[in-house]
Image (spheres, grey):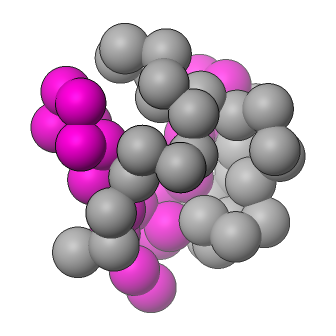
Amino acid sequence: MAKYICSTCGYVYNEEDGDPDNGIAPGTSFEDLPDDWTCPMCGVGKKMFIKR
């Protein structure tokens, strides 16, 4: 499972963990996140994330 880092604030989206506070189940790939999903820390969109 991959990790993606927000280029704005440094938040790390870990596919293994998901984003349960925002309804994203563990194991959800970054590509499968809804198009309107945003960084839970700073609010930027998926395009601002870089694969680590």
Q: Residue at x 33, y 63 (%)?
A: 50
Residue placed most toward the observer, 16 or 5: 5
Horizontally, is 1 left or right of 20 in the view? left
Most extreme residue toward the top is 42
- Above or below, 21 against 48 in this view is above
Residue 48 percent coordinates (x, y): 42, 44
Res. 41 image quadrant:
top left
- Above or below, 32 against 21 in this view is below
- Would residue 12 be visible to someone looking at this image? no
Residue 6 percent coordinates (x, y): 30, 43
Horizontally, is 4 left or right of 23 in the view? left
Quadrant that contains the N terminus: bottom left
Most extreme residue toward the bottom is 1
- Above or below, 12 against 37 in this view is below
Residue 4 percent coordinates (x, y): 35, 62
- Would residue 17 be visible to someone looking at this image? yes
Find the magenta span and give its range. Answer: 1-22
- Tell me, yes or no, whether the highlighted magenta stretch contains residue 19: yes
Most extreme residue toward the left is 10
Quadrant that contains the C terminus: bottom left
Most extreme residue toward the front is 47
Horizontally, is 7 left or right of 43 in the view? left
- Above or below, 39 against 31 in this view is above
- Say how many tags the image has: 0
- Tell me, yes or no, whether the highlighted magenta stretch contains residue 37: no
Residue placed most toward the observer, 36 or 1: 36
Residue 32 percent coordinates (x, y): 78, 66
Q: Residue at x 19, y 27 (%)?
A: 9
